[in-house]
Image (cartoon, rainbow, N blue to C red):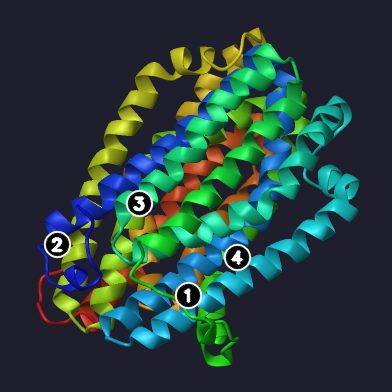
Amino acid sequence: MAVSADELGTQDIKKLLIKQAVPSSIGILFMSVNILIDTIFVGQWIGSLAIAAVTVVLPITFLISSLGMAIGVGGGSVLSRALGANHKEKALHTFANQIMMTFLLSSIFVVFGLFFSNEMLLLFGAKGSIMKPAREFFFPIIISVPFLALCMMGNNIIRAEGKAKFAMVAMIIPAFVNIVLDIVFIKFMNLGMFGSAMATAISYFMCFAFVLWFFIFKSELKLRARHFKFKIPIIKEITELSIVTFSRQGVVSILAIILNHTLYTYGGEHSVAIYGIISRMLMFALFPILGITQGFLPIAGFNYGAQNYERVKESVQLSIKYAAFLATVIFVVILIFAKPIVSVFTTDPKVIAETPEALRWVFAASPIIAVQLIGAAYFQAAGKAKKALLLTLSKQGFFLIPLVLILPNFLGIFGVWIAFPIADILSTLLTGYFLKKEINTKLIQTNDGIL
């Protein structure tokens, strides 16, 4: 049963977090399984070079589409707090402005991407024999990106309304469509990378169709023509918080550029393929932690807007506790089953031999990342854009990128893999400091701490 917006401020936090986090986790799971299976199909039916090509192209498309995610998350915080404060008209104007901003900005970036496709592919690491399959994959995907951006934006608003199950379905539909079409286009029609891209593009459109249906027939946010006017104060508030998410994705894209070039320099094309497998596993394995983080956001945002600080504090405590437990379980599974997991993706003996150790190192600090993820999400939900930006960028921007640039000069390719757990530890310590300070000053209705 869906949660109404008002229930975000009244239901038991444990039950509410489960209701919000479980559907979000399932949705992310299906999306992650989709990416995993897509990578397996590409690796088994086309080759490990195709995995490298996908690893180059996806950061470009996700950078553009993350405009929608950023506007969705930033505007979702504004919308949740407006609903919590019973400002319904502000919530409606916020949603309408999000739609216009997402479509306009993503379309501009897509046109830019089409005109400078070769330059972008080279920048993101399409070197040597990676370029040809990367180009085949790039064009169908880039054209579909505005649909993906609107899906990402809409999905965050669906969760902000408390309708996590509908958000889950919105993520399951493209996963199912993409897997079926992958089989048709790659296996039976032998369309190679172009077929994989077409399957992905069609799946984005189907997701958009479902999100559109939800807002027309199921949403509590009933927009009218008067809401579709740019409101500068609302745009400013959305932008301040959206910059947090978009900056994070921008830094992730910069990291992808640096990683792809560094991996190619120190290990060649097969090292890019190795990271392609690891990056898919990162998203797949951490799906419950990401689901808890997404489930936490509307709860914290609504109750912060309603000044129910005790409920905000409780949601922080429980989210960290649940996410830390699940992250530890995931780490143990990766530690034990790294080699069998890698063997599913490819038959390339060199990739199979080198990936398990790299995978274990990348996941080495995963048991503690809950503090970093939930802590950064709290500041975003509370509308504290500067701290949210600082903490969101801390892992990739302040720690991981410098480490990836420095360590391989001394440790070779191993320096890339060891950089990940070091960055996790440093960013968690930084976030933990700010979060504990916030709880002991702002959320002071009770005196017990969480750390």
Q: Is residue 410 above or below residue 245?
A: above
Q: CA distance from mark 4 to mark 3?
A: 27 Å
Q: Mark 1 or 2 closer to N-term?
A: 2
Residue at the disc numbered 1 = 95
Q: CA distance from mark 3 to mark 2?
A: 20 Å
Three-letter amino acid code at the position of disc 2 = Ile
Residue at the disc numbered 4 = 247
Three-letter amino acid code at the position of disc 4 = Ser
Residue at the disc numbered 3 = 166
Residue 73 image offset from top left, x and y in percent: 46, 66
At 71% from the left and 29% from the top, the residue drawn is 52
Three-letter amino acid code at the position of disc 1 = Phe
- Contact check, label 4 and label 1, Cβ < 8 Å: no
At 13% from the left and 55% from the top, the residue drawn is 15
Quadrant of the rendered image containing residue 122:
top right
In terms of secondary structure, where does tag 3 sit? helix
Q: Determine whether, in the image, residue 294 is placed left or right of residue 307.
A: right
Quadrant of the snapshot with the C terminus: bottom left
Q: Mark 3 or 2 closer to N-term?
A: 2
The front one of 438 and 119 is 119
Residue at the disc numbered 2 = 13
